[in-house]
Every structure is written in structure tokens, then in C-alpha cells.
Image (spheres, coloured by chain):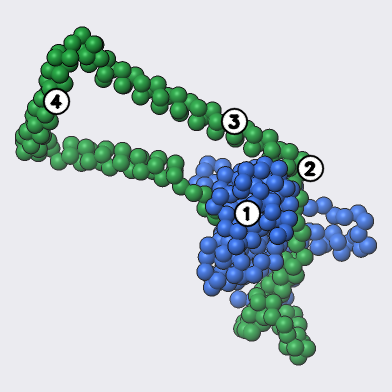
Amino acid sequence: MTDENAWVLQAQQGSDEAFTQLVETYQKPVYNLCYRMLGEPETAEDAAQETFLRAYQNLHRYDSSRSFGTWILSIAAHYCIDRLRKKKFSVFSIDAEDEEGTPFEVADPASPDPEVESVKLEDRNRLHLMLKDLDPTDRAAVIMRYWYDYSEVEIAQALKLTVSAVKSRLHRSRRALAGMWQEEKSRAHPERRSRESLAF
Amino acid sequence: MNHLPFEEWLLNNSPVTPEQQRDLDLHLRTCAYCSALAETGKVLSSVKMATPAPGFTTRFQTRLAERKAADRRRKLWGALLFTLGGLVLLMWAVAPYLVSFFASPATWISAIVGWLVFIGTTLFALVDAGVVILSVIPNFLPPFAWLVLLSTFAGVGLLWSVSIWRFVRVPRGV
């Protein structure tokens, strides 16, 4: 039995210490998923904490034949999707909050090629902003695929979708991201666009 | 412009032969969309994990303790109100009979019989009244009033169902 399985078993028997070990192990993946889904560190922290609380309260429902990581990420993804859907109908707009400034990843000063690193960083930050324009479930699928290297089957399990639905959502998201990327580039360099052939 | 088969290769990250790679490179030079698809793919494959602020576990423990205390308080108040309410109702219902029981058994038996007879006759009277009301009221109430009445019942029913559902539902993903 692995450490993780032992912690889950002990936590199911009421050990808060064992559950703390699980929080310690999964805080980064859960927080990252919430951050990529919601876009802001404060809301991501709140969502990650809520995810662990939900996991704690529903630990008796956890099926040990599944991976604990997939289970907890599934809770986090559904929580974030619900939160985004509620937010969509609330009076506050995402754009208004963005204007306050989303903290981005910062360049590593110890990098061997700071210029290349800086371009990569800019691209990553641009992509992070573009994720917000995807449908919440599509966004969750993209995050699980590229940040966690999950297979389509694992994503389907976590998001309660069929494998073909996951595949089509991933393709749709990639196309949408490419479209946004292309649009932004042509906005940034309008003179280039006139020389390029029409893509669609 | 025809993006096939390049779009499929890029979307599925399919392994390509050197010849296919050359064709793909040529296509990417002229197709802005596939070029964007390739670039976003490259960025997606170099993403990094975001890390929470230090002390996440401690903050979780505090939050868990607060949630447990709130749950305990809610359960305690619920149990207290339920018990007190039950006791008051019980006392209200039983007190007169207790008095008569301690006064004399004969009075107590006649009180019980009287009470049962009262319940029986009341039920019969209610059923009769209901039948009369149901046969008479439709002629008195305009259709609009029926509409309001039925909508109110439906609204209250819906509210009740939603409350029950919110109380018993399991969070998604669990």
C-alpha cells in the first residue's frame, strides 16, 4: 500500500493528520487548476480551500479503485465550473476584475537566455488570459490535458463526459485558442496581415 | 485554404515522417491559422504550474476548524429547538389529560372517549365541508383567482422541492 492510499484510509477513519498530508500533497495541483480556471489568485485560493473541504466532507464516498488525484481534481473542476456559471449570471463582470490587474508569472532572472525566456513567458501569460474566453468545461478539459498530462479517458472520468465529447471539446478549444492567438497577433502587427494569405 | 491533414496532425500532436514535417513547415509559412495552432500547441506544452501562497495547509486547517465549529453549533441549535418544540407540543397536548388522569380514572376514560369522538366527528365534518366547498367554490371564484391560487401552490411546492434538493444533494464531481 502506498503512502497516499494509507493516508486516504486513515483519513476515512477520521484522522485529520492523514488528511492534512493529502492537502500537503495535492495543494499545488488543486490550486493550479483553480487558478487556471478562475484566473485570479484570491479566488483560486478560496476555490482550492473549498475543494479540500468538500473532499473532507465526502471522503466516505471516495472509491479507492480510482486515483485520489483524479477524484480531487474532479471536485475542483466541477466547483470552478459551477462558480463560473454562477458568476456569468451575477452583476459583476470578469472584465471589470481583470482591469485591477491579474498577477502574471514573472521571468526567472537566473535563466540562461533571458530574452527567449521573456518571450515564452509573455506567450504563456497571453494564453492564460485567452483561457478565460473558453467555455468552463472546455477550459477544464484543456487544463487537465496540458497541465496535468491527463489522457482523454482520465479527463472523461473526471468531468463525467464521454471520451468522444472530451476529444471534440479539446479540438474545439484548440481551434478557438488558435483563432484568438491569430487575432491578437494581427492586432499587434496589422501591417503583416495584409501580406499574409487568408487563413480561413 | 485547405488545412487538411495539417490541422489534424497539430490537434492530435501526431508523430510525422520527415517528408510530412517538410510539407507541414511549408504549409505553416503560408497559413496563419495553422501557424497559430502550432504556436499555441507549443505554448501549451511548456505551461507551468501555479503555486499557492505559503501556509496553504495552515489556512486550510483553520478553515476546517471554523467549518466544524459552525456545523457543531448548527446541529446543537437544531437539536435544542427540535427537542424544546417537541416538549412544548407534548405538554400542550398532554397536560389537560394528565390533570384529569390524576383526578380520577373515570373522568380520564370519559375524556379520552370524548376526545376520540370529537376527532371522529371533526373529521367527518371536515370531509363534508370540503365536499361542499369543492362543489360550490368553482362557481364563485373567477378564473384569474384560480390561476393565482394554483400558481401560489405551485410556487410554494417548487420552493419546498428546491430546499429539500439543496439540503440533500451531493456536490458534483464527488
Q: Amino acid at mark 1?
A: Ile
Q: Relative to B106, is A126 above or below? A: below
Q: Which residue is mark 3?
A: B69
Give whichever of A74, B50 is nearer the camera: A74
Which label's residue is closer to the chain start, 4 or 3?
3
Find the distance from the CA under tag 4 to the CA under tag 2: 70 Å
Residue identifier under label 1: A72
For chain A, what colour was chosen? Answer: blue
Badge nearest the viewer, 4 or 2: 4
Q: Is residue B137 above or below residue A68?
A: above
| Chain holding disc 3 | B
Quadrant that contains the N terminus of chain B: bottom right
Disc 3 is placed on an element classified as helix
At numbered mark 4, what does the secondary structure look like: helix, strand or loop? helix
The residue to which callout 2 is attached is: B54
Specify the amino acid type for callout 3: Ala
- Element type where label 1 sits in the image: helix
Is residue A31 in view? no
